[in-house]
Image: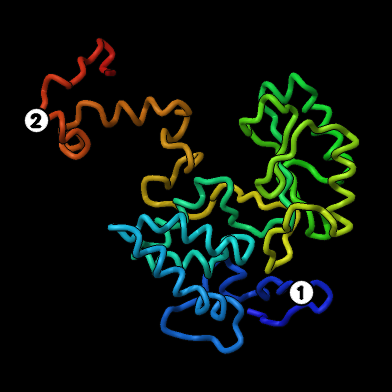
Amino acid sequence: MSTQTDAATGVHPGPVSGSALADGQSGWSPHVQRAGNPFDKLHASLVPEIERIIAQYEDRRSGLIPLAHLFQEHEGYLSPNAVAAIAYHVHESLATVESTISFYTLLFRKPVGKYMIQVCRNLSCLLNGAEDIMAYARRQLGIGHLETTDDGLISYEEVECLAACDRAPCAQVNLEFVYDLTRESVDAMIAAIRAGTYEIKPLAQTVKPGRTWKVEQDTGRKSAGGMNVSDPNNAGGIGDASGIVMFDLIVGKAKYETRSTERLVHETQLRPELSENGHH
């Protein structure tokens, strides 16, 4: 991984082609300190805070989300190195950490802009003109939903209810509320951000973001149960978008019931009746 810094932007460039990080994998190890590596330097500085966070919980795993926020606060997103470090400190697998952080939309698995503009698109805001505001913001920024401007400064997202319905249409910029949006206030916001005078503090940014931070659906190699089907992400398999075929393969099979309905073995009054077609 290149550790040089772009003098013009102060941002570390992305991993070089062919490196572990370029493949979405971490090059970090708790047992090796890589001289001059920016993440290793960051990790070393955060160890006291990491230990303080973990010490608050009976189960180390409970520190997973707080540690994710900690690393994102300093890197601007959760790099593969951060995921590996979190897994190490909470004594969990990489898969466990990745599956947890992928659930939360405010934890970014790819770099984002220094300013994250999130416009509410829920009912109250739509009734007060949010559709026009969103279209105008996209036009003024030159980007769409889940995209970042070419200079890496501003990311834009349309989100569900922000719970400020009395001040609709509203938005959040780096999680700070902005109320009563108009075209004029959108123009003023964008101008201030670009001029470096906006009142809201920018996010950390250690890697210049690409066009989008969206993580595409995994289409790589699957476990045995997902092989040789038309869509390995569809649990029902071929021609079974509803999952009913897979359900029928499980219902009534003793080997599955003993694994998934342990409580029903002891509390038989909870066992559901089967309908004529064999479904619960």
Q: Please say if 107 is above or below 257.
A: below
Q: Quadrant of residue 73?
A: bottom right
Looking at the rendering, which quadrant does residue 8 occupy? bottom right
Tag on residue 10?
1
Of residues 23 and 133, which is closer to you in this image?
133
Q: Is residue 258 left or right of residue 45?
A: left
Give the camera-side residue of 217 and 223.
Answer: 217
Q: Position of residue 146 (x, y in %)?
A: 71, 45
Q: How many marks?
A: 2
- Front one among 7 and 192: 192
In front: label 2 or label 1: 1
Q: Is residue 42 above or below residue 80?
A: below
From the viewer's perspective, is residue 144 above or below residue 254? below
In three-dimensional space, the C-alpha distance between marks 2 and 1, rounded to whole angstroms, equals 62 Å
Q: Residue at x 52, y 71 (%)?
A: 26
* Amino acid beneath label 2: His
Please tell me which residue is depicted at 58% across the width and 56% down the height of the picture: 109
Looking at the rendered structure, the secondary structure element under dot 2 is helix
Tag on residue 168?
none
Q: Secondary structure at mark 1?
A: loop
Instruction: Name the side, left or right, on which 117 lies relative to 132.
Output: left
Q: What residue sits 53% from the left and 70% below the top?
A: 81
Amino acid identity at mark 1: Gly
How busy is the neighbourhood of tag 1: few (under 14 within 10 Å), some, or many (20 plus)? few
Q: Which residue is mark 2?
A: 266
* Whole-percent x, y for residue 34 in the image: 54, 86
Q: Are marks 2 and 1 in contact (CB under 8 Å)?
A: no
Residue 202 in the image: x percent, y percent?
A: 73, 58
Mark 1 or mark 2, which is nearer the start of the sequence?
1
State which quadrant residue 125 falls in.
top right
Q: Quadrant of the N terminus?
A: bottom right
* Place of residue 92 in the rendered image (x, y in percent of width and height, measured from the top left): 35, 62
